[in-house]
Image (tube, helix red, strand yellow):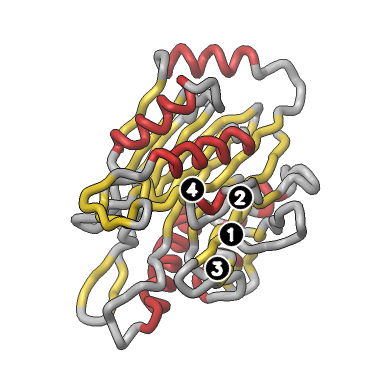
Amino acid sequence: MVVGNHSAIVFGLIFYLIFSSNGEAEKIRVASYNVENYLVMDRIVSGRWQEDYPKPLKERRIIRSVINQTNPDILAIQEMGEAVYLQELWGDLNRTKGTEFKYSAWMTGQQEGEKRHLALLSKIPFTKIDEPKDLSFKYFEGERSPSRGLMEIEFKTGDTNWSLFNLHLKSKWTERPDDPEAAIRREKEARAIRDYIRTKFPPYTDPHYLVLGDFNDHKNSAPLRRFLQVNNSTLTQMIQCSDQKGHFWTHYWDKQDSYARFDYLLASPKLFKKLVPDSAKIGGFHLCLLGSDHRIVFADFEF
């Protein structure tokens, strides 16, 4: 886990708590964005195959534009490369007078050799960062864990302590004929993460938390259902998002020319009550698909 800030975290936290305790409701915009391979890899650039090539400059500029137009207070990121690339994005946003984030966090995946990681940028300080380790599950002949892990960040907004869980479930690509589209693997990842959250925050305690990220599946799929309910207990409620045209898709696969919704915001019932009406959106910004194959999703909460 790598944590960064532009000033001392302790000083920033004290300053924030003093000047946000004036009795007024505080609105926080939370966003989730899969930035598609923000790393060095073999890729096609301008019609030519390039080995060990970073994310092209044009794509990075569009990523920054999408973030700036959304202007989130907290940005959960998927498919970030090594920590140095998060620092690059962070620095570029600040140097270009874009959205100014004071705090950052980066987490490596749980699978050895994983190149795509979870990260977070925030305007407000977090009180704690955790990287849950015991998320193992049985998968055919052996034990596995969610390859990209789970990032847990705790915040205090006004008088409310709340947690954010950033995740990126297994994609549908697989080499296993006995698990088509990795559906079994993805459901088991979701179940392991769900059980961790449920154990830490039993529904009867009325917790405040948000589960968000790239779930790589549709809204009625088994992985999504695992997070929503267990027996008669409601764990989270899905926040309905759409773009300015009323469309719900968040991912475009150019090879198949297909659109799907893979990115979600799931709020515990207590936090769902703090959702600002009509604030949940999918960013249908101009040229956004030239920066990533995912669209940003976001919503406002009032504390």
Query: Are there few (<14), some (14-19), or many (20+) residues within 10 Å of tag 4?
Result: many
Query: Are there few (<14), some (14-19), or many (20+) residues within 10 Å of tag 1?
Result: many
Q: Is residue 48 left or right of residue 123?
A: left
**Residue drawn where x is 60% and y is 54% of the image:** 265
Measured Cα–Cα span from mark 4 to mark 1: 13 Å
Residue 59: name its quadrant: top left
Query: Are there few (<14), some (14-19), or many (20+) residues within 10 Å of tag 3?
Result: many
Judging by the rendered image, the residue that carries numbered circle 1 is 250
Which of disc 2 and disc 3 is earlier in sequence? Answer: 3
Q: What amino acid is at disc 3?
A: Leu
Judging by the rendered image, the residue that carries numbered circle 3 is 224
Q: Which mark is residue 212?
A: none
Q: Which mark is residue 297?
A: 2
Vertical relation: 61 (above or below) 201: above
User: Nearer the viewer's eye, disc 2 or disc 1?
Assistant: 1
Judging by the rendered image, the residue that carries numbered circle 4 is 291
